[in-house]
Image (cartoon, helix red, strand yellow):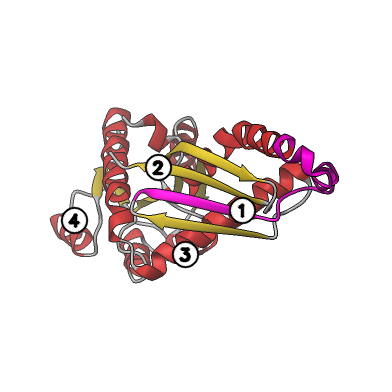
Amino acid sequence: MNNEILSGLNVLYIEDEPVLREEITTFLKRRVKSVIVASNGKEGLEKFATYPVDFIITDLKMPVMDGIEMAREIRKSNTAIPIVITTALSDVELMQSSIEIGINRYLLKPIDLETFNNMLESVCQKISNNRKNMVFSLTVEESKNLERRIETEIAKILKSTTGKGPSKVQGFLRANLIEIVIHGARTPFEQTILSNDKNVRIGDYVREVYYAQLKNQIQDSIFEISGYKAIWQTHKCDSTRDVDIIKMVLEIE
């Protein structure tokens, strides 16, 4: 199983039976990043609209709104997210209905944990395949949205670590290449040092060390945003212009 992918996933789990819900929630929490829990389809829809979700596991028969009806509503806005249905029924018509609205897996109760693990592995593979194809199939609007998210996250990291946010961050995504251009990030202390032209190289060195220390945090943030492992290539600092450039490659394979 791809533990790196699994451990980074947010799972929405919907089950109306409290004992089973607690058992599976505990099982999932040991394996995934977070588990968002709901007790019926209506609550599941509300949680789906509120929290970031990577895949869904839902019971079929529930009060208020069942799993099929909930999945049908979700598919109106999201056709890619994996949805797994669990049920005590072995009903061919229900299974066919599930397939028609894009259900990825159908698990019978009582849930066998080995089968459940196999399901998680299958979902991870699907998500991995989706991510491998994502960058190359992005529309211009989707690519721009991803760039904006990267810009926002980098600005937050810089502000939280220095106390001063940059005046501007630009993110450029070209296939699996990412270039981040940071403007106006020098702190008042750095500006004081740079008031003497002889200290420019010192200023560059300080910034280079700073980004080297942030390397893992920035790579992790890119993974969270894009779903791809980001491999750091270079970072170049120009204190004279107060411009820094970071280049990374997304590991597609």
Please report whichever mark, 3 or 1, sits nearer to the chain's N-terminal start: 3
C-beta proximity under 8 Å, tags 3 and 1? no
Name the residue type under label 2.
Val
Real-space Cα separation, disc 2 to disc 4, in angstroms = 41 Å
Magenta segment: does it hold 191?
Answer: yes
Amino acid type, callout 1: Ile
Task: Name the residue beneath numbered marker 1.
Answer: 182
Element type at marker 4?
Answer: helix
| Residue identifier under label 2 | 249
Q: Are marks 3 and 2 in contact (CB under 8 Å)?
A: no
**Circle nearer the viewer, 3 or 1:** 1
Q: Which mark is residue 145?
A: 3
Residue 13 visible within the image: no
Element under disc 3: helix
Cα distance between the residues tagged 1 and 4: 52 Å
**Quadrant of the rendered structure where residue 126 is?**
top left
Between circles 1 and 2, the one closer to the viewer is 1
The residue drawn where x is 48% and y is 30% is 30
Viewer-side residue, 232 vs 84: 232
| Disc 2 versus disc 4: nearer the observer | 2
Q: Residues within 10 Å of mark 3 (few under 14, many from 20)?
A: few
Bounds of the magenta segment: 176-202
- Tell which residue pokes out farthest to the front in this image: 198
Q: Residue type at mark 3: give it.
A: Asn
